[in-house]
Amino acid sequence: MIDESVKQIAFSGSSHPLWRPSIGHKIGWIFLLVLLVAVANIVVVKQMLNDLNDVAATLNVSGKLRMLSQKIAFETANLSHRKKAKNEAVDVGIRDFEAALTALLKGGSVFGYDIHGLGPQHQGRLQTVRFGWERYRDYIEAVLAEPAGAPMVQQFGSIEEAAAITLADTENLISFIVADAQRTQRHGLTQIYFLLLLDILVLAAAFVAIRRKIVHPLHELSGFCHQLSAGNYDVRVGFRSSDEIGQLAVAFNHSAQRIGGLLGHLKQERQSLARAEAMFRQLAENSGVGVYIVKDDKFHFSNAKMADMFGYERKEMTASVSIFDIVAEEERQAVRENIRRRLDGELQEVHYERRARRKDGTLFDVEVFGSTMQVDGRAVTIGVMLDITQRKINEREGQLAALAYQHTSEAIMIADAVGTILNINPAFTEITGYQEHEAVGRNIRILRSGLQDRTFYQAMWQAINTEGKWQGEIWNRRKNGELYAERLTINTSYHEDGTVYRRVALFSDVTEKKQAESLIWKQANFDFLTGLPNRLMFHERLKQEIKKSECAGLPLALMFLDLDNFKEINDTLGHEVGDQLLQQAAQRLRSCVRGSDMVARLGGDEFTLILGELADVGVVERIARKILQTLAEPYLLADEALYVSVSVGITFYPDDAIEPEELIKNADQAMYAAKDRGRNRFNYFMRSMQEAAQGRRRLARDLRTALTEGQFWLSYQPIVNLRTGVIDKAEALIRWQHPSRGLVSPAEFVPIAEETGLINAIGDWVFLEAARQAVEWRKTHGPGFQVSVNTSAVQFRRDGIRSAEWLTWLEELGLPGDGIAIEITEGLLMDAGTRVSDTLLAFRDAGIAVSIDDFGTGYSSLSYLKKFHIDYLKIDQSFVRSLGPDSSDLALCEAMIVMAHKLGIRVIAEGVETADQRDLLAAAGCDYAQGYWFSAAVAAEDFPLSC
Ligand code: C2E
Ligand code: MG
Ligand code: MG
């Protein structure tokens, strides 16, 4: 920039004409002018003096002429008086007179004067003088020519007269000459004045010129120099001149410009430097990376981030931390080597990654960029340090991602915005059959199967274009044409301007899974035996049908069907026959309704029927009758004609209920009511059923607090040994003293306790209470006394009986296992899983007896009795109730007793109310009996010692 300006100045200088008048020239011109004026002065003065001298000489000569005229006259007179003439003086006078007159007339040298002849203005008077003189001379000469002593008075008179005339003429001439001299003198003075004026003008001009051309520029230069010395380099000399001062001004201007430029540049550089330093500080202070300066292994500077990164205070960092302190032990040698190479000048720039060490000793990864420079003859490193822990993790994750990309079983495909495949992974090839070179560059449409319709793809792309992603299952086609299902996830990566960069598709082959799912779905939603929708599907459909009915504003009927006495057929003729019966019943049910109506099997012999959008509710009854009729037809199974009836409960949406669960409950209640009313009939749901259900709900609520509030107690019914008549056992029967309802029967609340799960806690309490009582009675009624405890099948399910805890309680009470008998039902054995058998085994191992309660009402399977090592079999009171000497029940009882004894199981008869019953049973070989004949169940304190 400076050089440029200098060049410009040099260039502008070179544009001047080649010849430039210098200040010497100018002064020379002024001097010459003054000299000329001086010469002119001399010439003019000299001329004037000459003129004056000439006039003076002329005057002198004229004066001499006058004086000579008189002298001649005098001499002449003298001559005549002495009579002896001596005429040399007169002759000299005459000659002088005439010489003077000639000189005056024609000019020339006379009496030592060089005079010019008088000018023409005096010629007339001079001629007058000449004429007068010539006459005068003639008189003189005449006188002189007279002999000596002759009278000459007359001549003398003429001479005198002529002398006077000549005198007068000369006087006149002189006066004119004097006037002329005065004029000449005046003229000379005028000339001198003029010259003086000219001198003044010339001097003034010289002064002005010197002032303008020299003094003023010098003054301006001096002011300029002052400004420069004051540091104002913007000032410029304004005048233009080609002389030395002008050049000096240009040089000064250039210098000022250059110095100004230099200073400006210097200032700029200083400012840049200050800015750079400020920027460095700013950068360093606000930097997200560590910035440091290291001098002699010590930190000369560290920004806050750097200190923070290493867990030091900033001051501490520069005061006492060495670079060896911030690297891991194993890196120190490398650092040392680096320093050495830096000092040796081998290293200028450094870039490396290190394991760094924080103040607290924890290690992390850093990346270092450093540069070495010399400051005051010492090597200084300035650098930045980045915590790359996250980057390292990212790199590792990136490597893992790449590894996963290559080895994942999930296919990955990367395509551009228009669907051109850019990259695929090996799993893609494995699933689709397309090799990389076959897929890359082609459109993703190569996989299309054509199975999905246009609307599917429209919805899919709508989602991709708006949200950038889509997930779902899709059928595609492999290279070999085979169809396959894939679970596909599409994601989008965008450019910064929001346009699509890449689409990433991840998919896995779910064909097998889908097939399995479809099977599972079928299994989950359909009943395997009848092919009818199952409970799950039924619930779904019910919800849908309710919605449909709601929309259509038409009622919906829900029927709950339960085959009457199916259990008996199942138990007596076996499951296979039972299954066939169910299948046929299902078919018949289907035939009774429209295709749009739903028939479902909930399980066992329970079916439901949804009759949706009923324009005519009368159709429901017609269908119900048809069902009763159709199902009542004989079933030809196992070469037998079997008869089964059905009980149907009917409820309506929205009249009876609007919630699906409530509707189901209503239909169930209505069905039970139909059963209660004698089966083989249909029954509409009524409010009273609901009220009963509400009563059960209230009971369930109260049941929750019954245990903690001590509302339960145990009654005990004696069990009598029929051979000895001794009471050696008792059955513990729970009682619930309800605060408002009074005593509630277990038949009422146990099912509720089972439904709510409260039976587990209640069962625990019963067991512990009964065991305590057994301990007591073993003292009073003999050491072999046994208390039997009823259990529910629910207790044997998950989290039910904690047999280990029960055994611990017995141990704590000091009651041997045989002090307790557990009563279970036949049903439990039928459905027994490992949990049940394990629990029973645990009881048996502990010596606890197991009784089958209510035997004969269920499956009455002998094989189970054998399998589970049962101790007692309790004949249900329904067999005992109508026991007579020749009754079928007696035969059944005898059969059960014999069979049980064969299996080593002892028999207890329940519900013995009469002595006959007791006797018949005793005669049949029954081991024990209980019933009102002996004693009803009583409180422990009322328990009899003997019956
Ligand atoms: P269960 O185990 O069959 O008990 C016998 C039932 O018959 C008792 O009714 C008893 O009072 C009654 N009974 C006894 N002798 C006669 C008689 O000569 N004639 C008639 N008609 N009935 C007689 P309860 O106490 O009402 O118990 C009903 C059912 O409740 C029991 O039948 C049992 O299954 C269940 N239960 C009672 N206590 C418990 C318990 O602590 N836990 C469990 N899970 N169930 C219990
Ligand atoms: Mg019992
Ligand atoms: Mg019983």
Image (cartoon, rainbow, N blue to C red):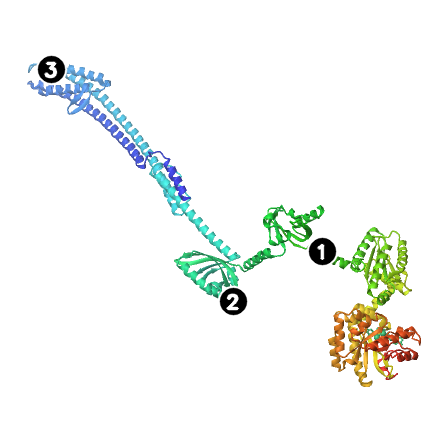
Q: Position of residue 142 (x, y in %)?
A: 11, 14
Front disc: 2 or 3:
2
How far apart marks 1 and 2 lie (CA) works out to: 58 Å
**Is residue 761 something that shows in the picture?**
yes
Q: x and y percent of residue 7 in the render?
A: 39, 40
Which is more toward the observer, 9 or 385? 385
Q: Is residue 291 left or right of residue 886?
A: left
Pick whichever of labels 1 and 2 is earlier in the sequence.
2
Q: Say the numbered circle drawn on residue 515.
A: 1
Up/down of 897 relative to 160, above or below: below
Q: Residues within 10 Å of mark 1 (few under 14, many from 20)?
A: few
Q: Which residue is mark 3?
A: 141
* Amino acid type at mark 2: Gly
Picture quadrant of residue 732 = bottom right
Density class for disc 3 (Cα within 10 Å; few <14, some 14-19, many ≥20) is: some
| N-terminal label among 1 and 3 | 3
Which numbered disc, 1 or 2, marks the residue closer to the eye? 1
Percent of width and height locating residue 156: 12, 16
Cβ atoms at labels 1 and 2 below 8 Å apart: no
Question: To which residue does mark 2 refer?
Answer: 361
In this view of the protein, which residue sits in the foreground, 652 or 428? 428
Where disc 1 sits, the SS reads: helix
